[in-house]
Structures are given as structure tokens and as C-alpha cells.
Image: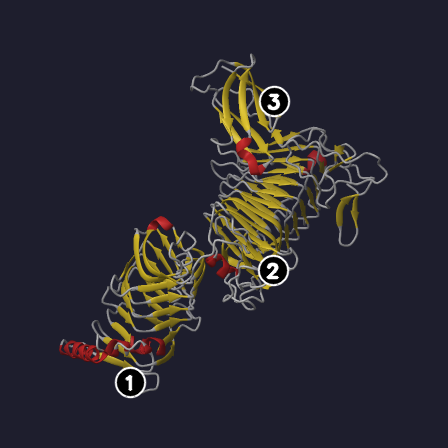
Amino acid sequence: MNTKYIGVFFVMILCVMGTLHSTTIIVDANGTGNYTTIQEGIDNSVHGDTVLVYSGTYYENINYNGKNITVASLYLTTQADSFIRKTIIDGNQNGSVVTFESGEDTTAVLCGFTIKNGNGTYNDFLIMGGGILLVNSKASINDCLITNNSSQGGAGICLYYSYMSIGNTSIFNNHSTHWGGGIGLYNSEIDFSLSNKCDIFLNYAGEGCDLKSINSNVINVVVDTFTVTNPDDYFAYPLDNFNFTIQNNKIEQIDNNLYVSPSGNNNNNGLTADNPLQTISYALTKIKSNPNQYNTIFLSSGTFSSVTTNENFPLNCRDYVPIHGENTNSTILNGEGIYYIFYSRYDSNFTIENLTVENGFSYEYNGGGILIDYSIDIIIKDVNFVNNRAKGGGAVYISTSQVIFNNVLVKHNSSNAGGGIEIRKNSNPVFINCIIDSNYTITPDWGFGGAISNNVESNSIFINTQITNNVSDNCSGITVSGGAGSYCDPTFVNCTICGNSENPGGTIRQGDHSHVSLINTIIRNPSQEEIIFWEGYPEKTVSLSYCNIDGGIDAINTNNSGNIIWGDGNIDEDPLFVGGDPFSYELTPQSPCIDAGTPDTIGLHLPETDLAGNPRIFNGRIDIGAYECQDTVSVDEPDTNFIHNLYLFQNTPNPFTNETEILFITADYTRVEDYSLSIYNTKGQLIRQFDGRTNDFWVKTKIVWDGTDEQGREVAPGTYLYKLEYNGNAVVRKMVKLR
């Protein structure tokens, strides 16, 4: 269309508006108009007015304040694209750049601006809408550039119980720490123009980099350009909530490994270590998620941060895309006390290896180093989490997830709950050969779990793990609580829990519906009471076998609200650590913990080496604690034949009437589908069978048997055998069913 005639057309419109008693208010930063700021123009307008803004940069945060008006640049009267780029509203990192929050309707129009440098406004539960925020309102957005804004939710645009129509607008390079880097919707609707198409590309967020929808209807996204041609849930979450019509893509995805280096360049192809990309976030955008061929992002040595390498934290983890550093100590992801580092929500099948995560920060949220929520089949290996801070789980926050941590250091992290790690809601993480040291809670007289907070139906397993020197005013080591109607059952095998700070809450504190199992573990700390049950809460049990606990059974205070299962082999003796500076928790040859562990280690899921890298069994019997003494005087060869990948617990209750729980550990966590649990009568006839493929076995699994056979018929009272089998090995136990 001819620009000259378009301009005349809009002038005529303004004239007609004038005859209807509307006003055009001129804003010019140079002082030639009615006002020098846009907000002044809005404040002095009435419904139906137009605030016409001349070119320039306006450092302000504007609010329509319920006015159904048009705020526009000279693009409105000229249709010249140059006015969009020359007329800038810069939020100056002082909140949302443009806000509609007073019940405006679709005649509230924003047209022809560059919207930038906003950082959002706190609304209800999150900082939302870095560029544009709608709350319980409507608006029409046309002919704008929305870029370089940030927030926790909906960095470019956020709609909260609102509606927007949008056309000919580009939304790019916005950054949300939580969700919706480009656009975030919460119980809202958005209509994309079919004729004046928008562009949405290269935005970043912990979840839904370009688009995120929460409790909203299906959205038809009709755009000229999107980041990729075929988005998956990395770009738009949940993917089923969006129907896409995309004409062009900004990036061609690569179905291959990619290489990243702080000295790289995002203009490189990233296909070799000699031609690397610079940012991990760009590599995550560029790489193709392929379940048939895992494509790995390889990180060189060096430091990745927002300041030095323009990194976009947190990194939105992707299904089937491992991230591997070159070296644990020299590949560093540094949040600089501003951002947390990794975000995994509804993700699966990836690993993070060989790197250090440091200085992550998420004080208003959880997981300063990594947040893992509703995710499965994740492995974190050879990673250091150091100096991270968050509201919950200073380094690591896990909720409703299955994760394996192997050879991980968690040190000098802090939070309100779980200075190092917080585990919640149906999570089953496994920690093997880990060190959780010198973490602390930051809320005096309230913060709990200096090392670990473990709550609400979480069956964590800690094996060969050192939990030391953690600090809290209220339980310096581990807090455990199931909550009303739910259970929390952590297991500690060959752990060293020592040197955690003295406090009235003890080293391990148990709340309601908690069952803690300690096997082959050293527990020696300054607190007078090592294990304390919260008074008045129901159903608490702690079981110990082959442990060295300072003060023995008298160091456990049940407050008359739970039970102690005091098994075989427990001792109360100085473990005679090597000591020194830095202090070593390895055992001297004179230690009473040597060869004092359980004689039957079948199925304890023990690694082949201890924390020092030595064989886990030396001299024929396992030691108590996370370290195996390597007495060079001994002539016996290390014995590792105990690792049969099976451990079957006695069923509870036993005897039983209606149903009983059978608990077992599947040590080979990569092949849980190959395990089977079978129930036989005393004649050897198979009564019932559970297998890993159809019963969702995990590392620690509970099977509830209701006393019926495969056809659902109740079996007769009597003695039954239950057998756990894997890879040619089997463990069998007995149980009794009563009438």
C-alpha cells in the first residue's frame, strides 16, 4: 500500500476522532509537544484519546491505569517502520515496561514502539512481564519490537487472567528465569493476527523458551518466523497446548553433537572442538533432541557466565541431550550470584557430567545449582556444586523425580531448608560416592537440615556418602518428614555422618510418617542427641544395623512417639579417623570400624570403590563408613564378589492379614526392567509375579501384595516365599499370611 495515502488515511481518522470529542496528545522528549513523558500523556488522557509519541528513547515504565486509549509512535500516522526502532520505551530495569492492570479492554492499544530493558513486576506468586504485563485486563498490541526484557515468568509478554490481540510484532532475545521467555500465559488467551503475522524467536527460559501456557485454552500460533520449524516442548510448553502455523525458522537444528567454548562464537557451526559455539543456551536451542541417537553438548574447560560469555541461565535441560564438561574442576558454570544454573521440569533421559556449578542464586525459588521437577532417568556424575544459594535446596532441589548422583560434591551451599539438598514429593534419588560437606541453613532459629531436607513420600538412598561439617540451628544433618498420610523412607548405606554442628535438633530429625534405615554407617557428631523424633507426630521408626553411633541407643530420643529397631552389630566406639588438616574421614588401621560391617552385603547397591577410590571390600568383610581401610600389612586380595545387584528386605507387616509391603533395591539402575519379584507357596507353585517392565521398578521399590493370585483370588493362610531375581542371582525370604 502507498505510504503517502496511508498517512493521509490516518490523519483523516484522527480528524474524525477529533469531531467525536477525542484528543490527540503529543509527547516529545525534546519539549515540543504537550508533555515530555508518555506517562504524563496517559495521565492527562481520557477514553478514546490518542497519545502520539515522537521519536526518542523514553526511560520510563508506563501504566494505562484503566484508560482505553491508543499510545502510538509516529508509525501510526506514517506507517514508516523506522519509527518503530526510533521510538523506544526503555524500562531501565525498574519493572514492567508497559502495564495493563485496571480492567482495560481491547481499545487499549499499544502501537509502533521498541519495548526493552524491563525486568517485570511481582504479581501473586512471581515476577512477571518484563516487557508487557496484563493482569485481569485486555489490550491490543500492534507493530512493536519486544526485546531484551527479563522476568521470572513471561519475559517478553505475560498475560495473567487476561486477553490480548497481537499483530506485526517481533518478540526476541527476552530471558525468563522460570517460564515463558517470549510469552507466558496464565489462565489467559491471545489471538495472533492471520494477516499481520508476528515473529517469535531466540527467547530463553527455564521452561518454554519461547512460549509457556498455564491453565489456558489451546492457542493457535500463526507466525511468520519462529525459532525452529518444528518446535518441541523445549520451545513451547506444554506442546499440546499450541497449534503452530510457521512460515520461516530462525535456526536450522543440527542432528549431531555440538561443541561449546568460552572462546567460541555462536556464528560458528559448533560441529568440532576447533569451531565451537560460545553459549550453552544457544547450543541447547540449536541441537536436535533425538531419542534414537543422543546428541551431546561438549563443553571445553573455562568459565561460562552471563557476564563473560553472555550465557543465559538457567539452562533449560532437554530430553536426550547430555551435557559433558571437559574436566570437573576446570569446566565451570558460574551464576555470579544472580542466576541458578540448571532447570529440569518434565524432562527425561539426559546426563550432566564433568563440570562445576558455582555461585548459583535462587533465593526466591529453589535449587541454586539445579532444580529438578517431574523428571526421570537423569544422571548427574562427577559434578561439583559449590557456593550456591536458594530458598530450598541450596545446591540441589528435587521434586517428583528420579535422579542418580554419582561422585558428586555438594559443598558450601546454603538455603532455608536443606542447605545442600532438598528432596520432596514422590522423589527417589540415589546418591553414590558423594560428599555433602559444609553446607548451612541461613534462617536463624528456623532453617533446618544443614545438609539435607528429605520430605513427603521421598525414598532417597545414600550409599558410600560422606555427610559432614554441615551447620544449622535446627538439625544440622538431615531432616526427614513424610507429612499427613504420606511416608518418607530414606536409606543410608555405608555413610559417614560426622562433624555436623551441635544444635538442639540433633543430627537426624524425624517428623511424622518417617522411617529411616541406617546400615554400616558412622554417626558421630557434637550434638548430645544424634537422632530426635519430633514430639507428637505419628508413625516414626529408625532402624540401625552394623552402625557406629556416638552414645549408642541412648543417643536416640523418640520423645515417646516412635520406635527404634536396634539390629545386630551396632557399636559405640571412637572410629579413629586419619584426621589432619584438611580432616580425613578415612579409617586408621586400628579403627574398630574395620571389618565390622554387615557380613551379608548382597544387594546393598555398593559401588566397587569407596570415596577414596579404593576397593570397597578389603580383607574379606566390609568396613563401617564411607571409606574402606587399605591395611597394607594384610595379604588378602580385595574382594568385590559381593556385588550381586540384589537386596531384598523383610516384608512388613509380617505376619499379615490383608496386605503386606515388600521392599527391595535394584542395584543395576540401568536395567531395572530385568528384575522380577515372584511369590510361591511352600509347594513351589507360582502364586504371583511382578516384573520391572510392567510394575515401574526403580532403584528402591515397594510392592504391595494383597494376598491374591494372578487371577485376583485370595490365597489361603499359610507360609509363602518371595524371591527377587536378576541376572542369574536370587534372594529368597519367607512371609506368613494369617486369616
Determine the secondary structure under disc 1.
Answer: loop
Determine the secondary structure under disc 3.
Answer: strand
Where, by quadrant of the figure, is residue 602 drawn?
top right
**x and y percent of residue 233 in the render?**
41, 51
Residue 309: mark in rendering? none
**x and y percent of residue 232 in the render?**
40, 52
Determine the secondary structure under disc 2.
Answer: loop
Q: Residues within 10 Å of mark 3 (few under 14, many from 20)?
A: some
Residue, far top: 683
- At 81% from the left and 34% from the top, the residue drawn is 636
**x and y percent of residue 464 in the render?**
67, 41
58 to the left or right of 484: left
Front-lying residue, 30 or 693: 693
**What residue is pinned by disc 2?**
300
Q: Which tag, 1 or 2, sits closer to the chain's start?
A: 1
Q: Please tell me how many numbered marks the rendered image carries.
A: 3
**What residue is pinned by disc 1?**
33
Where, by quadrant of the figure, is residue 26 drawn?
bottom left
Residue 732: mark in rendering? 3
